Image: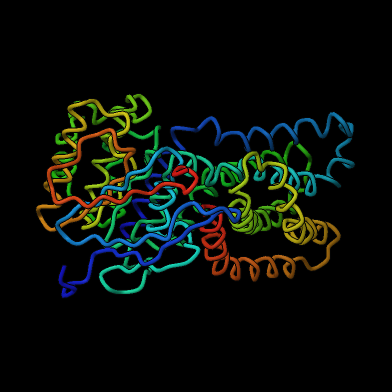
Amino acid sequence: MPAAAAALIEADALCFSRNEERIFGPLDFRIDAGEALLVKGDNGAGKTTLLRVLAGLLPPESGQIRLQGADFARDGFVQLAAYLGHRHGHKAELTVLQNLRFSAALHGRHDEALLERLIAACGLAGYEDTPAGKLSAGQNKRLSLARLQAGERRLWLMDEPYANLDLAGIAWVNTLVQRHVETGGAALISTHGAYAAPAVPVRTLDIRRSAAHG
Amino acid sequence: MAEFRALLRRDTALMWQRRGDAAQPLLFALMVCVMFPLALGSEPTRLAQSAGAVIWVAHLLAGLLVLDNLYRSDLEDGSLEQLLLAPVPLPLVIASKVLVHWLTTALPVLLVTPLLAQMLFLPDGLLPVLMLGLTVGSLLMSLIGAVVAALTLGIRRSGMLLALMALPLYVPVLVFGAGSVWSAAQGLPWLGAIWLMCAGLALLLVLAPWAAATALRLALS
């Protein structure tokens, strides 16, 4: 791999410990534009923690994160990346459309046509005025994924995007990631490994607690 | 600015959905002011003496009642993470939350204060002093509360700790606020206490959102 273009995100000997117990690391990886990184690990292996460290929500114990060649900074991160947590990140009391409109506005977008397109694409057409709390778990996931797209960021950090989705939903996520990656984006997807990967250039990162090896 | 408006609109819509919760402080303050004369006796002169102090304490405790809701639901459904990772400065997010919180929980109590004052036979001349002090004081308490609520957010069931941390910080506000009413009742100059609270408000308007932002980042890590 030529080092000419800086990776979208790059980790260098990244470690994280909680209460003196090593959760993961040291990890080295990079994600370039046009590829996806699949983070595999069992339950409790530290996938979510890794994503939270990469998003700057947790400080790493040691090691470095670089964004497009520059040292990690919150401002750089929010312009570059969108984060899909394992919690929905939208309000149960607000309707699908209200939730999505708020996320788009937070990212400086006020395009109603875009919102309609996103809702239709995630299969929630007809549910625009339904409070998110009345939707099923899978539908909530779909709404979160629609929200992820609303900001139009290049790097997607996705924590278990397949959870709660039916087969059609999993295929839809894969198409989403594929289209995103093919248009110059990149994605980091954490999964416990039971699902088919999207049909794009994929690197795999296995994180396991050292105890799990024994 | 568009982001700030979007935040305000979202929080107001949420408050409207939970208007039952938002009515809690109002009912609480009302109950205190109904119960107090029952306990003390309905003699107007005796009530009039303590009216200002009772209304101040009712305001303070009513605000404390809903303080924990400020960030709790956003934390639980992951919205707070998204707000932290949005291209909007976190202090701005907090400022909008505090503003909506004040508008929906403190302002209604403020609006019924003239009624409470009538119920407790507060002398008419003291009402403007009380209202002025409460307006500044409730803003002060909302801002202090925003920092304390952020500090205790990492702890589940933090209600007791929240109260223990917030009450000492509320004491100066209460002393100056209720003190201004007392001074006015004695015919002493009372504007000094209000000015001091205004100075505190100016300070906290600048500092509190930043302090709360730092505390929130810590609470989430």
Residue A149 screen position, x and y as percent: 22, 47
Q: In this view, does B29 lie to the left or right of A29?
A: right
Q: In the rendered view, would you say A199 is above or below A55?
A: above
Q: Nearer the viewer, residue B102 or A99?
A: A99
Residue A195 location, quadrant:
top left
Q: Which of A22 and B110 is in front in this view?
A: A22
Residue at image coords 62%, 45%? B155
Which color scheme did the rendering employ for the protein?
A: rainbow
Q: Nearer the viewer, residue B151 or B64?
A: B151
Residue at image coords 38%, 58%? A54
Q: In the rendered view, would you say B196 is above or below B87?
A: below
Q: In this view, does A39 lie to the left or right of B208?
A: left
Total labels: the figure holds 0
Q: Would you say residue B142 is visible in this rendering?
A: no
Q: Which residue lies furthest to the front in this view?
A: A214
Residue B9 screen position, x and y as percent: 37, 46
Residue at image coords 17%, 27%? A168
Residue B201 screen position, x and y as percent: 61, 65
Residue B202 screen position, x and y as percent: 59, 69
Residue A1 location, quadrant:
bottom left
Q: Which of A30 and A179 is in front in this view?
A: A30
Q: Would you say residue A134 is visible in this rendering?
A: yes
